[in-house]
Image: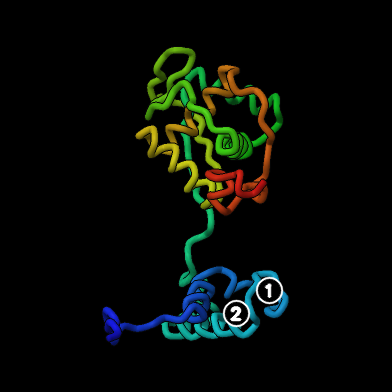
């Protein structure tokens, strides 16, 4: 005698419906100026699936009173923004370093994050406040606020390290900047946002992509 299904009345969502739903919520269903057929080929889906996702997004946008496209209905951007306030001697040395290297603070912060994720190590300092040259730096004015955006995949990988060390991602980024300023981290490649990986496994399990 065959065992009955756990819930014979449950909705059975097909893979096609699931894929259409994911595309509907993504920015790919709202890209302007790109041929849908070419986009479907680039994404590795059929044109019919992408077309259905676009039509559903437009229908949802109309219902929500956003006939021009409803980009606000899409998933958040595929990146995470991080901020650090830099004080005292660390701020002065950072300003000098940025001037010497002729790079923006965002490029430095993004590049050391990428380097760390590709070659993990534990920074000497992992604290909520600045530790620089063996001393704690209290918040003061003037200070330098630096920020950068990293891919969602990089953010997920960074959070794994933060969870293992029971700290925040900002603690790791602060520690990495200190590694640079104190001369322990000297060699790293300056990269652009587009060079970061979107798939966290590229950082967490890099051997899968060798």
Q: Is mark 1 on a helix, strand or loop?
A: helix
Callout 2–callout 1 Cβ contact below 8 Å: yes
The quadrant of the picture occupied by the N terminus is: bottom left
Nearer the observer, 182 or 123: 123
Based on the displayed image, in which of its 4 quarters is residue 98 positioned? top right
Q: Can the viewer see residue 33?
A: no
> Which numbered tag is attached to residue 39?
1
Q: Is residue 18 above or below residue 145?
A: below
| Residue 174 numbered tag | none
Q: Report x, y in % for residue 139.
A: 39, 25
Name the image quarter holding residue 165.
top left
Q: In this view, does 198 lie above or below 175?
A: below
2 or 1: tag closer to the N-terminus: 1
Q: Which residue is drawn at 66% across and 76% down?
A: 40
Q: How crowded is mark 2: few (under 14 residues within 10 Å), some or many (20 or more)?
A: many
Image x and y of residue 84, in percent: 47, 35
Q: Distance between the residues labelled 2 and 1?
A: 9 Å
Above or below 78: residue 202: above
Q: Is residue 179 left or right of residue 37?
A: left
Q: Is residue 51 visible?
A: yes
In the displayed orientation, state which residue is furthest to the top: 134
Picture coordinates of residue 47, whole percent (x, y): 65, 82
Q: Could you classify mark 1 by the number of other residues whose Cα lies within 10 Å: few (under 14), some (14-19), or many (20 or more)?
A: some
Question: Where does label 2 land, which residue?
Answer: 50
| 150 with respect to 11 (left or right) | right
Q: Residue at x 52, y 59 (%)?
A: 77
Q: Is mark 2 on a helix, strand or loop?
A: helix
Within the image, what quadrant is residue 141 found in? top left
Q: Which residue is drawn at 44% across and 12% down?
A: 134
């Amino acid at each position: 005698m065959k065992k009955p299904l756990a819930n014979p009345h449950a909705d059975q969502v097909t893979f096609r419906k699931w894929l259409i739903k994911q595309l509907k919520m993504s920015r790919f269903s709202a890209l302007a100026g790109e041929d849908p057929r070419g986009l479907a080929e680039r994404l590795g889906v059929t044109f019919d699936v992408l077309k259905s996702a676009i039509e559903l997004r437009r229908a949802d946008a109309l219902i929500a009173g956003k006939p021009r496209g409803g980009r606000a209905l899409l998933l958040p951007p595929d990146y995470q923004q991080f901020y650090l306030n830099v004080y005292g001697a660390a701020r002065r040395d950072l300003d000098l370093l940025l001037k010497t290297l002729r790079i923006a603070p965002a490029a430095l912060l993004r590049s050391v994050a990428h380097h760390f994720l590709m070659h993990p190590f534990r920074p000497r300092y992992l604290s909520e406040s600045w530790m620089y040259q063996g001393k704690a730096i209290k918040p003061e004015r003037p200070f330098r606020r630096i920020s950068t955006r990293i891919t969602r995949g990089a953010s997920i990988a960074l959070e794994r390290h933060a969870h293992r060390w029971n700290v925040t991602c900002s603690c790791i980024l602060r520690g990495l900047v200190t590694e640079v300023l104190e001369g322990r981290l000297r060699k790293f490649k300056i990269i652009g946002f587009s060079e970061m990986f979107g798939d966290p496994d590229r950082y967490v399990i890099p051997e899968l992509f060798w």
